[in-house]
Image: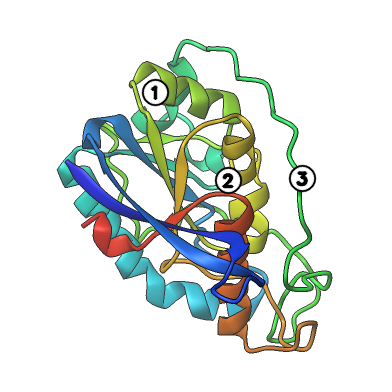
C-alpha cells in the first residue's frame, strides 16, 4: 500500500481566538494500482532562461520518483502541453487515443482567490520578455515506458484512462505551479472542480515569478507562497519521498 501524509491548511481560531491558517495533516493508504502520477509540462526547454536553470537540476529527481512509482505499480501519464504530437504513433500516445471515451463530470462552482504573487509579467526573473514556444517534447531525461504509460494533454482522454484503469486518486507533479500546474485543462483546478481526489507533490516544482514584482520576495519564497495557496484553496500536498 502507498502510505501518504496529506498536508493542507485550514482557517480556524488559534489559542487566542484569532483567525489563523493552520497546517492540517491526514494519513491515507492507497493501493498503487488505483493511483496515477500525472506529469505536467516537464518540457525540454523554455523561453525564460531562469525557468530552464531551475528545471534542469530537478530532472534526475523527477525521473527517480517516476521510476519508483512505476515499480510500485502506480500508473504514469505524461502531459507535455502543446507538443504531445511529438509522440504521435507511439504506443503510449495511441493507448490514450484508443481509450473508449466516458463523459466528464460537470465542473463544480468554485471560488477562485487571487494568487499570492504577481505574475502579470509572465514571471521571468532573468530578463527575457519575448514569449516563444521553445519546447518541442518532454525532457528526454524523463523515461517513458511505452508498454504501460500514457501520453496525453487532452482532459477527456486522461479522464477516460483514469476511469477505465480504475484509478481513484491522482498525484500531480509538475513545474510552473502558478501557471501550468493550476490552470491547464488537465490541471489541478479542473480535477478539483470535477470532484476527483488529488494531491500535489510540493517539493518537486517551481513557479514563474519575478522578485521585482509583488510581494517582492525571493523566487524560492514566491514558489513556497504558491504551494501554500494550493494547500489552502485547492488540494493537499505531499513530498516526493512518500512515493519512493
Q: Nearer the viewer, mark 2 or mark 1?
A: 2
Q: CA distance from mark 3 to mark 2?
A: 14 Å
Of residues 166 and 126, which is closer to you in this image? 166
Corner quadrant of residue 210: bottom right
- Mark pair 2, 1: CA separation: 23 Å
Which residue sits at x=46%, y=36%? Answer: 197
Q: Which quadrant would the N terminus be assigned to in this image?
A: top left
Q: Disc 2 on helix, strand or loop?
A: helix
Residue holding disc 1:
95
Please report whichever mark, 3 or 1, sits nearer to the chain's N-terminal start: 1
- Does dot 1 land on a helix, a strand or a loop? helix
Residue 61, x across and y down, in percent: 31, 68
Query: Which of the numbered marks, if any, corresponds to residue 188?
Result: 2
Residue 190 is left or right of residue 5, and the answer is right
User: Do we see residue 210 in this rendering?
Assistant: yes
Closer to the chain start, of discs 3 and 2, is 3
Are the residues at dot 3 and dot 2 in contact (C-beta closer than 8 Å)? Answer: no
Front-most of 181 and 145?
A: 181
Residue bearing mark 3: 111
- Do we see residue 64 in this rendering? no
Mark nearer the N terminus (2 vs 1) = 1
Residue 49: image location, x then y, percent: 62, 79
- The spot of residue 33 in percent (x, y) is 24, 31
Residue 176, above or below 35: below
| Residue ID at (69%, 58%) | 133
Q: Residue 240 in the image: state x and y as whole percent.
A: 32, 62
Give the left or right position of residue 81, taking residue 66 as reference. right
Quadrant in the picture for the C terminus: bottom left
Q: Quadrant of residue 99?
A: top left
How packed is label 2: few (under 14 Cα within 10 Å), some, or many (20 or more)?
A: many
Residue count near mark 1 (Cα–Cα under 10 Å), binned few <14, some 14–19, many ≥20:
some
Task: Say which of marks 3 and 1 sits in front.
Answer: 3
Amino acid at each position: 500500500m502507498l502510505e501518504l501524509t496529506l498536508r493542507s491548511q485550514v482557517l480556524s481560531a488559534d489559542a487566542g481566538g484569532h483567525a489563523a491558517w493552520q497546517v492540517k495533516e491526514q494519513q491515507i493508504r492507497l493501493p498503487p494500482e488505483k493511483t496515477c502520477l500525472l506529469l505536467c509540462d516537464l518540457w525540454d526547454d523554455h523561453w525564460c532562461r531562469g525557468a530552464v536553470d531551475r528545471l534542469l537540476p530537478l530532472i534526475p529527481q523527477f525521473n527517480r520518483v517516476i521510476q519508483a512509482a512505476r515499480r510500485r505499480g502506480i500508473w504514469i501519464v505524461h502531459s507535455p502541453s502543446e507538443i504531445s504530437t511529438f509522440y504521435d504513433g507511439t504506443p503510449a500516445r495511441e493507448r490514450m487515443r484508443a481509450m473508449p471515451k466516458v463523459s466528464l463530470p460537470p465542473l463544480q462552482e468554485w471560488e477562485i482567490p487571487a494568487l499570492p504573487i504577481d505574475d502579470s509579467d509572465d514571471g521571468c526573473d532573468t530578463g527575457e520578455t519575448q514569449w516563444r514556444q521553445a519546447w518541442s517534447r518532454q525532457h528526454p531525461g524523463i523515461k517513458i515506458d511505452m508498454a504501460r504509460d500514457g501520453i496525453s494533454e487532452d482532459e477527456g482522454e486522461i479522464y477516460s484512462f483514469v476511469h477505465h484503469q480504475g484509478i481513484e486518486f491522482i498525484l500531480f507533479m509538475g513545474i510552473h505551479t502558478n501557471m501550468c500546474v493550476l490552470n491547464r485543462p488537465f490541471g489541478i483546478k479542473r480535477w478539483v472542480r470535477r470532484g476527483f481526489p488529488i494531491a500535489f507533490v510540493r517539493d518537486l516544482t517551481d513557479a514563474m515569478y519575478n522578485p521585482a514584482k509583488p510581494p517582492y520576495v525571493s523566487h524560492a519564497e514566491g514558489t513556497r507562497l504558491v504551494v501554500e495557496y494550493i494547500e489552502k484553496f485547492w488540494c493537499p500536498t505531499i513530498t516526493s519521498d512518500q512515493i519512493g
